[in-house]
Image (spheres, grey):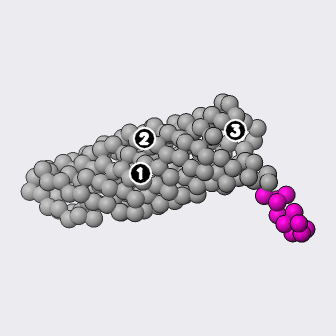
Amino acid sequence: MNKKAVLLALLLAPAAAHAQLFVEGTFGGTRVDLDEFQTQGFSVDEATGTWSIGGGYMFNPFLGIEAGFRSFEEFELTSPGAFTGSFGGRPFSSAGAVNLKADAQGVYVGPVFETFIERFHLNARAGGFAWKSDVTVGSATHKDDGFDGYVGLGVSYAMTRNAFFGLSFTRFRVLDEIDVDAWDLRLKYSF
């Protein structure tokens, strides 16, 4: 065996020893950024629930990839009276007060970066979110979809060598213009 092959094997051995699959689930709440509508007099319900299930693979203790499914519950807003405007990129007009509702769900994928201090793990994530949404304006429902990014930060505690409990914050964009901030409790198990 030549020296380069031995050196490469020595460098990759610790990373391969830490490589591992993981599964995780989250549940929590969100805040939907509807400030633009509030300034126009809309009554808004910007707090909803959210959950996700996913998994991934850590190539080494610091870098991995994640993928999964995320669902956001329905949020709602009501116009103060007659209104002409757009929501989720769709124009609408109403002679009287109008009720708008939307939800979103989809798949996400992206890299995960981790570091740890003792039993505490800090992580950062970023990636793409392919979402679908039902947008109801009055009595008409429109289906919409898109692909937008997400970014997040989190901290977790190693309850055992393989089981982690943590908190995370992730910002998603849905309906091409609305930011959704998710605050989650996260459970993760590594194999």
Precedes in sequence: disc 3 or disc 1:
3
User: Nearer the observer, disc 1 or disc 2?
Assistant: 2
Res 137 label? none
Distance from the alpha carbon under mark 2 to that under mark 3: 23 Å
Amino acid at the residue labelled 1: Val
Q: Main secondary structure of the magenta part?
A: helix
Precedes in sequence: disc 2 or disc 3:
2
Question: Is there a contact, CB below 8 Å, between mark 2 and mark 3?
Answer: no
What residue sits 55% from the left and 52% below the top?
66
Q: Is residue 9 magenta?
A: yes
Res 51 label? 2
143, above or below 183, in the image: below
Q: Quadrant of the N terminus?
A: bottom right
The single residue placed furthest to the right in the displayed view is: 3
Q: Which residues are magenta?
A: 1-12
Res 120 label? 3
Q: Which residue is mark 1?
A: 180
Q: Residues within 10 Å of mark 2 (few under 14, many from 20)?
A: many
Disc tally is: 3
Q: In the structure shown, which secondary structural element does the residue marked by tag 1 occupy?
A: strand
From the viewer's perspective, is 139 left or right of 40? left
